[in-house]
Image (cartoon, grey):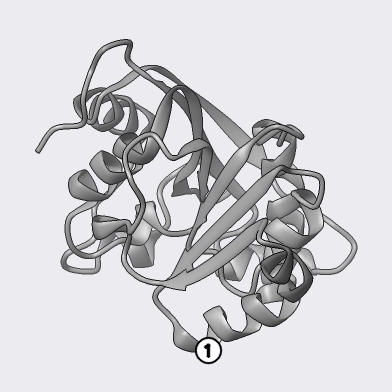
């Protein structure tokens, strides 16, 4: 799976455009591939993941930065982020929101809470098949939300984000075959770029 994420990280990092002055949080950071490959120049990075194994791997990958105090990796849940309000200038979350069982509204509210007023969030909000229909296995599983661009805009606005931009991103690369990309749902997906609404607080 880590290899399958490599093309996604590259494409999404172009959308996120990490800046040297950023304090960047990755939700669902996995083994730290995006932070290590595309945010090495960023002022400070943080990652959170539910998997203890992934957290250990990410900590090893970012060990130098952690020792320097410019990175932290924690085990935890996006619905209860362990950081203070307005901590980050950017948040990225891939392959989590669109297959989340639980409370995605609370997750979006937490992301809004830890973002600064001039911050930005980049989130994947749905994987598609080649005919641009939502992936069937996600659509038919109980508890999963079916994310469409209109629903993503509505839920982001509800969470306190202003005029989110939704774009279709085509993923491809030499490390993973087209068949594998399609099988895992990594070939085509929607990305939302959103900024906090001025003066709006995340819903309780």
Give residue 148's position: percent from left, percent from top: 35, 36
Mark 1, residues whose alpha carbon is within 10 Å: few (<14), some, or many (≥20)?
few
- Image quarter where the N terminus lies is bottom right
Task: Identify the residue at horizontal 63%, vertical 60% (top origin).
Answer: 71
Task: Identify the residue at horizontal 21%, vertical 25% (top origin).
Answer: 201
Q: Which of these two is toward me, 113 or 65?
A: 65
Image position of 19 with respect to 69: above or below:
above
Compared across the picture, whether 98 is left or right of 54 comes to left
Give residue 24's position: percent from left, percent from top: 58, 44
Q: Residue furthest right?
A: 174
Task: Identify the residue at horizontal 38%, vertical 30% (top origin).
Answer: 149
Residue at mark 1: 53
Image position of 32 with respect to 13: above or below:
below
Compared across the picture, whether 14 is left or right of 201 comes to right
Compared across the picture, whether 113 is left or right of 118 comes to left
Give residue 9's position: percent from left, percent from top: 70, 53
């Amino acid at each position: 799976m880590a290899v399958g994420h490599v093309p996604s990280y590259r494409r999404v990092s172009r959308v996120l455009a990490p800046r040297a002055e950023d304090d960047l949080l990755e939700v669902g950071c996995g083994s730290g591939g995006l932070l290590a490959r595309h945010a090495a120049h960023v002022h400070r990075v943080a990652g959170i993941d539910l998997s203890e194994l992934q957290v250990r791997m990410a900590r090893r990958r970012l060990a130098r930065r952690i020792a320097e105090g410019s990175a932290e990796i924690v085990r935890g849940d996006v619905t209860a982020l362990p950081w203070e309000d307005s901590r980050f200038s950017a948040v990225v979350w891939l392959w989590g929101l669109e297959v989340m069982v639980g409370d995605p509204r609370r997750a979006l509210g937490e992301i809004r809470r830890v973002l600064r007023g001039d911050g930005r969030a980049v989130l994947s909000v749905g994987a598609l098949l080649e005919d641009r229909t939502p992936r069937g296995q996600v659509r038919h599983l109980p508890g999963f939300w079916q994310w469409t661009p209109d629903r993503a805009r509505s839920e982001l606005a509800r969470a306190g984000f202003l005029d989110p931009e939704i774009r279709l991103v085509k993923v491809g690369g030499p490390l993973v075959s087209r068949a594998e990309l399609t099988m895992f749902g990594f070939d085509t997906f929607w990305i939302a770029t959103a900024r906090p609404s001025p003066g709006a607080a995340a819903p309780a």
